[in-house]
Amino acid sequence: GGTVLRFDGTSWQSVDAGTTADLYATWSAGPDDVWVVGESNTVRHFDGSQWRERSPPTGSNWRGLWGSGPSDLFLVGDGGHAARFNGGVWHPLQTGVYTRLRAVHGTAHDDVYAVGDEGTLLHFDGGSWAQGDPGLTRDLVSVWATPRRVYVAAEDTDLMTLVRTDWPCATNETQCDDGWDEDCDGLIDCEDPECPACPLTEVCDDGADNDGDGVLDCADDDCVQSTVCPQ
C-alpha cells in the first residue's frame, strides 16, 4: 500500500508519500498542491517539498476525491461519509446515505455528483445532498460531470449518461479552453472548427489541455523548454 507514482513528462517515478495505507484517489491543482486519499482516514497533501497528513475529523476509508479549486475539495468514502475542505480545515457533510461512496466529480462548488454501491447517485447543490435514481442497482464506481451530461460507470462495465436538459446549448463554441462542449455538437474546445481562439498555447502547470491536442501540461511538446517542467 501507499504507492504513489509521478509522471515527469518522460517516465513514471515512485514517490514516497509517507504512508503504507492503500490509496484510492488523487487530485491536484498543480505540482505544489497534490492530494492522495485512502483507507483508515488517510488524507495526505504534498506542498511541493513534503507530504503531510491532513485527515478530516470524521474517519472513513476515503475512496473518492475532487476539487473545484485548491480551497474547495470534496471527499467521499465508506458508510456514506463525505467531507469538504475550505482551504484550511475539513468539515463533515451529511449525505443521507450509508452505502459505500466510491467516486465524486463536479463542475463547480455547487454542482457535485457522488456515486457508490447499490446504485447510489447523489447531487450536491452547494447546500445539501439529494439522492437521484440512475435506474441501476449495481455498484457504481466512477462519475464524470459536465454542465450538460453526467457519465456514470458501473462495476460490470455498464456506462450510463445523464443528459442535463436544464443547461441550454450555445449557438457556437466560444470558450476554447474550458473542457466543455458549449454548442452541444460533440466537439470540445479546439476540436470544434468554430472555436475562434485556436490554436492555443499549452499552459504547463494548470492541469488542463489548453491547446486541445489531448496532451496535458509537461507531457505536451509545447512545454519542453518550460521552467516548470523537469528537464
Image (spheres, rainbow, N blue to C red):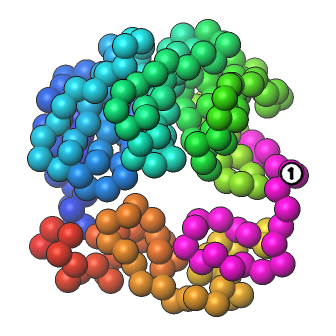
x, y percentage for residue 221?
Answer: 31, 81
Query: Which corner quadrant of the image does residue 178 belong to?
Result: bottom right
Residue 65 seen in this snapshot: no
Residue 213 appears left or right of 146: left
Residue 53 screen position, x and y as percent: 22, 26
Whether residue 147 is visible = yes
Q: Is residue 205 left or right of residue 168?
A: left
Residue shown at 65% from the left, 35% from the top: 126
Residue 177 x %, y %: 55, 73
Q: Main secondary structure of the magenta part?
A: loop
Neighbor class of circle 1 (other Cα within 10 Å; few <14, some 14-19, many 20+) is few
Q: Quadrant of residue 167?
A: bottom right
Q: Position of residue 164 (x, y in %)?
A: 82, 49
Location of the N terminus (image quadrant) = top left
Q: Nearer the viewer, residue 155 or 9?
A: 9
Viewer-proximal residue among 142 and 172: 172
* Above or below 155: residue 167: below
Q: For mark 1, give the secondary structure.
A: loop
Is 7 situated above or below 19? Answer: below
Relative to 226, residue 56 above or below: above
Q: Residue at x 11, y 47 (%)?
A: 49
Q: Is residue 157 above or below residue 170?
A: above
Q: State which quadrant residue 125 falls in.
A: top right
Residue that label 1 marks: 166
Q: Is residue 180 magenta?
A: yes
* Residue type highlighted by circle 1: Asp
Residues shaded magenta: 159-182
Is 195 part of what is drawn in magenta? no
Residue drawn at the location 71% of the way across and 46% of the way down: 150
Q: How many marks?
A: 1
